[in-house]
Image: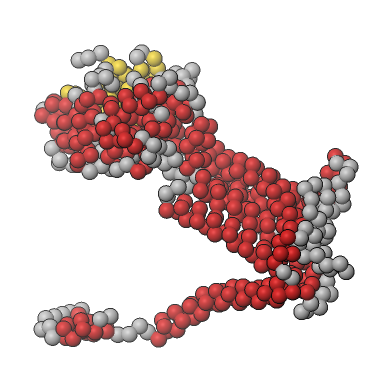
Amino acid sequence: MSTEGASSYGDLPAVATDSPVGARNSMDRLYAPPALSERLIRAFLMFCAALSIGTTLGIIGVLFEETRAFFAQVPFSSFFGDTQWTPLFAEKHFGIWPLVGGTMLTTLIAMAVALPFGLTAAIYLSEFASATVRKWLKPALEILAGVPTVVYGYFALTMVTPLLQTLLPDLAAFNVLSAGLMMGIMILPVIASLSEDAIFAVPSSLREGALALGATKLSTVFRVVLPSAFSGIGAATILGVSRAIGETMIVAIAAGQQARLSLDPREGMQTMTAYIVQVSMGDTPTGTIEFHTIFAVGMMLFCMTMVLNLIAQHLRGRVLKGSL
Amino acid sequence: MVEPRMKVQGLKAWFGSSIALRDIDLDIADKQVTAIIGPSGCGKSTFVRCLNRMHEVTPNARAEGKVLLDGKDIYDPAVNPVALRRYVGMVFQKPNPFPTMSIRENVLAGLTLLGTRAKDESGLVERSLRQAALWEEVRGGLDRPGVSLSGGQQQRLCIARALAMEPEVLLMDEPCSALDPIATAKVEELILELRRRYTIVIVTHNMQQAQRVADTTAFFYMGSLVEHAATTKIFGNPTERRTADYVSGRFG
C-alpha cells in the first residue's frame, strides 16, 4: 500500500532466516500487485454495473429530449390547464388530467382492495399462522405475484365485468371498476409480502413486553407490533401504489381507451399507461406531435413513480436503521 | 421464615421434547427478594417465565405442575394467563420500551393495552416513575420517546411500566445484564427499595448481585433445584457440594 512503509521495512534486520516455513520469502509478497486475473474480473464486474446505470441514464435522456420537443409545440399551460385529452382527433386537446384522473381512479380502487386484504394477510402470516402454514402460504402468495398481468387483464374483461354487470346493469363493457379490482388482486401479494417482512421484523422482545403487561394477543398486535412496523407498511403501500400507477396490461385491456375526466368507476377511462400502449401500437408516424405526446405522458408517469419510490426507499431505510 | 406468597409444586417445563425444568418445588416469600442463580442453560429464565405463564408463549413450549399464587393454582385450566400477567409483572434482560411511545405512554402502556385508562394518569405516571427512581431524571420531558433514554434509564422505565400495573409479584430476568456498573448499582438500589412493597424474584448471573439484593437464593443446575436457602447460607455455608463448587467459582 504505502511505499514509504516499504523502504523502512527493508532496513529491518533479518530475523527469521532459518524459519522452517520460509517466513522471509513470504514477506516479499507483501509488495506484489494484485494478479491480472483479479483486475480483469474487477473491471468486468464494474462494466456490468455501469451498463445498467448507463441504460437508465440513456432512457431518461431520450425521455427528456422528446418531452422537450413536445413542449416546444404544446405550451405547459394547455398540458396542465386543459381538461381534454384528444391528440389523436382532428380537434386536438392536450390536457393531461383525464389520463392522470383515470390512473388515479384505478389506483384508488386497486388500493382499496389490496391494502385491507394484503395487510390482514400479512398480520395473519406473521402473528397468527403456525410455522408450517407460513412456510406454505407465503410462497403461494408470491406465486400470485408472478401471474402475467395480461392474464389478469383478460380475466377482468371476460369474467369480472360480466359478473359485475349482473349487479350493476349500468356498467360499461370497458370500465375502471373491474380493472381496478383486478389490479388490486394483482398488487395484494406485493403489499402482503412486504408488510409481512416489516411486521415479522419487529423484535419479539416488544411482543413479550406487551404480553407480560397482561395485554391480549390482539391488543399486542394492534397497539405495539403494527405501530412499530409502520414505516415498513408505509413503504409497502407506496410501492403498491407505484406498481398500480405503472401497471399497463390490465387497464389497456379492461378499462377502455377513452380519455375521460370523470369520477364514475362504472365508465371506461384511459390511463396514462394505456394511452402509451394505444399510440405505440397504432400507426403514428415518428416525429409527429401525436408521437411526441407519449414521451410527455411517459415523463409524467416517470416523475410520479419516481417520487413514490423515493419516499418508499426513505421509509425502508428507516426500517433498516431501526429508528422507526 | 415469612409465609410464602407463591408456592411452586412439582413444576416441569419443556421446549418441544427436551425437558428444561424437572420437578421444581420452591416457596417464594412475601415481600422478599428471591434470587435464582445457576450456570447458563440451567433453567433459571424458564423457571421465572413459568411464574407468569410466559413460558408457554414460546412455540412448542409447555409446562406442568402447580404454581400457587395466594393459594390459587395459576395452572388451573380455568385461569386466564392474560389476566394472570397483570398480577405477576415482568422485567426482561434487555430493556424493551415500546419504540412508538413516549416515556409517559410507556408507563401507561399496560392500561392502554387493556383498553382502559387510569382515573389520575399524571398521578400514576409520577408515582410509578418515582418508585422506579426515574422521576427526577425525566420529569421535564415525559413526552420524549422512551427509546431516547440511556440503557439504564430504559430499564428503569420498563420497571416503572410494570409497577404501574400494581403487580403482586415482580419477576426480573437478569435485569442488569445489559447495563453498565453504574446503571446496575441504581437498579440494585431500586430493588432493595421495592422489596418493602413487592415480592420480587430475580434471575441473575452475577453472584455478587445475588448477595447484595436477595434475602434467599435458589441454585439451579441442569433443570433441577439444587438448594434454596437464606442468601448468607448459600454463599457462606451451603449444604450441597454442587452449590459450594458453583458459588466458589469452581465451575459455571
Given residues A291 and A166, the one toward you in this image is A291
Given residues A153 and A305, the one toward you in this image is A305
Q: Give the quarter of the figure containing the C terminus of chain B.
A: top left
Residue B144 in sight here: yes
Q: Residue at x 28, y 80 (%)?
A: A1
Query: In the image, A27: left or right of A309?
Result: left
Q: Where does residue A141 sit, x and y in percent of width and height?
A: 63, 50
Q: Residue at x 32, y 38 (%)?
A: B154
Q: Is residue A23 above or below residue B221?
A: below
Q: Residue at x 77, y 65 (%)?
A: A94
Q: Give the quarter of the figure containing the N terminus of chain B.
A: top left
Q: Where does residue A198 sit, x and y in percent of width and height?
A: 51, 48
Query: In the image, B104: left or right of A29?
Result: right
Q: Where does residue A318 sit, x and y in percent of width and height?
A: 46, 52
Query: In the image, A133: left or right of B141?
Result: right
Q: Is residue B240 above or below residue B28?
A: below
Q: Quadrant of residue B15?
A: top left
Q: Residue at x 36, y 35 (%)?
A: B142
Given residues A221 and A135, the one toward you in this image is A221
Tag count: 0
Q: Where does residue B155 sit, x and y in percent of width and height?
A: 31, 37
Which color mode does the image show? secondary structure
Query: In the image, B203: left or right of A100?
Result: left
Residue B222 in sight here: no
Given residues B95 and B47, the one toward you in this image is B95
